[in-house]
Image (spheres, rainbow, N blue to C red):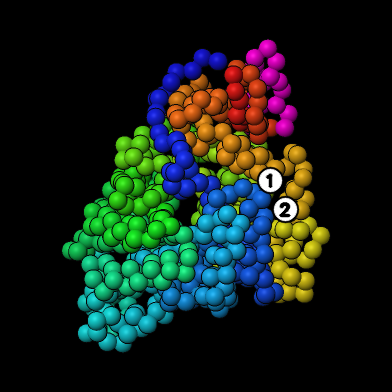
Amino acid sequence: MPAEPIEDIWVYERVPGDPWWRDAVVYQVYLRSFADGNGDGVGDFAGLRSRLPYLAELGVDAVWVTPHYVSGGADGGYDVVDFLEVDPSYGTVEDVRALVGDAHELGLRLLLDIVPNHTSDQHAWFRRAVADPTSPEAARYHFRPASEEPPNNWQSMFGGPAWSRTPDGRWYLHLFTPQQPDLNWDNPEVQEHFDDVLRFWFDLGVDGFRVDVAYGLFKDPAYRDNPGIYSPSLFGHGPEQAMTTNQPQVHAVWRRWRAVCDSYEDGKILVGEVSLADLDEVGAYARPDELHHAFQFRLLKSGWDAAAFADTITEALTAFDAVGASAPWVLGNHDKTRQVTRYGSPARARAAALLMLALPGSAYLYAGEELGLPEASVPDDARRDPIYFRSGGRRLGRDGCRIPMPWESAKPSTGFSPAGSADPWLPIPADWPALAVDRQLGDADSTLTLYQHAIMLRALHPALGSGRATVSRAGDVIRVDLVARHSDSSPITCWINMGTSPVAVPAGRVLLASSPNADGPADGVLKLDADAAAWVTN
């Protein structure tokens, strides 16, 4: 098939002794929704510990757990009351220690989530700051004097103004909900506290952190108006958020945190949420002395479009290679509509997964995507996401991608909770038992089996997940040629057909295909279905 090469890119390939994280497969657990161990309808550390063997069998390298701290409950754990304690609904600090031990015995690393941009309004600092404007704690947040109008035009990411008032009339900043006041990172006491937080959990054995809002933290010290308003439809924050995101001072924080990581012999890591539109700017966060990984979300936010996918892959590989970093890839998470629904079919989601798992760099999976779970329809009276309420119902929010995991098809709550437990915190759709883990294990054509085989092959073939990537596109078909740099292993080509008709592509042998009906190869040609992907050798 004729195809014009977009770019020929040399990127990192794993070699003995290289850091594990550079091409790792990381599995994100939304803690409330993964497994309920104590029967209260909410996922917890006991439940997660019981399901670690499943993750080891899946073949992932690490598990990332969403916030587990004592929380005010306004935003799914991202409004933290105490960064050094575990929310009782999830367990205790000793449960985290035990989880680390279990994970390490199974060959898994454990990453936690850290939320440095803001606290809960119930945090002791903020309560003291509200009570006494002259207190040291008040200087740890962004307060502005009382006035009739908000200090500027800054808007909350969840809708509405980013400023709310205290009882004495002062304004305080919250780029998310009013229950999440932003910290003032110009204050050295804030920086020192988070040094202590990192070391506390690292000393417990935790292997790293995913850093929430890593592109944020600092704000314009003059509190000038933003030139525009962020829209969720954008690929990421850009010039319209010039006063509230991506301030240059933030890079000094990541260098400081990297030094903390490097002080540990076992090599702790930082994975930053860097939701910026400019991929070169995202890459700057992953420079050798800053974050180990910096998420870019353009692929996650792209529709089912070959040109968008090919351009994004090329730009991201180029941006990360320019700073000597590996590219992290993600197609789903706890903030985004699930792939099956977003792309329009399970077949497309399966094909996109094979493409992502072939690309050089690390791959981040979101719990349930390996089951092919769709976005769930949640009754309005069951919704929990503040986005839904702050937008007056105009934005449905993220509850539909946070439904509890279906484990066992014949059990109540599909095995999410023990028998006789409270109802799950979000309702499980009636048709989800058909997608449960026990229904898919051992089924050669299931999405779970596809992921298991893909992750296993990725570990066996140096060309997958690393090496040299040549990206090309012909119409709706993308070709990624992958060649190992440091071994003589066979090159592999990943094809993805994002069109509406089957296409014939050159192939000597099929390693794995997303469509169980892939025809061939015969006479060196594979008939690749529409909305399908395949890994082939020639």
Residue 44 is situated, as x and y percent measured from the top left of the image, at 60, 70
**Camera-nearest residue between 2 and 377:** 2
- Residue at the image position 68 percent from the left and 46 percent from the top: 448
Assign a secondary structure to mark 1.
helix
Q: Which mark is residue 505?
A: none
- 255 displayed left or right of 446: left
Residue, far right: 410
* Magenta run includes residue 427: no
Q: Are marks 1 and 2 in contact (CB under 8 Å)?
A: yes
Residue 69 is situated, as x and y percent measured from the top left of the image, at 48, 72
Q: Does residue 383 appear in the picture of this structure?
A: no
Quadrant position of the C terminus in the picture: top right
Tell me the kind of residue under disc 1. Leu
Q: Which residue is mark 1?
A: 448
Point out the tag, 1 or 2, that comes first from the N-terminus: 2
- 379 displayed left or right of 4: right
The residue segment tinted magenta is 516-531
- 263 displayed left or right of 357: left
- Mark 2, Cα crowd under 10 Å, few <14 / some 14-19 / many 20+, is many
Residue 159 is situated, as x and y percent measured from the top left of the image, at 41, 62
Residue, far bottom: 131
Tell me the kind of residue under disc 2. Val
Residue 507 is situated, as x and y percent measured from the top left of the image, at 62, 19
- Residue at the image position 46 percent from the left and 59 percent from the top: 207
Query: On screen, 176 above or below 330?
Result: below
Q: Does residue 221 appear in the picture of this structure?
A: yes
- Residue at the image position 65 percent from the left and 32 percent from the top: 512
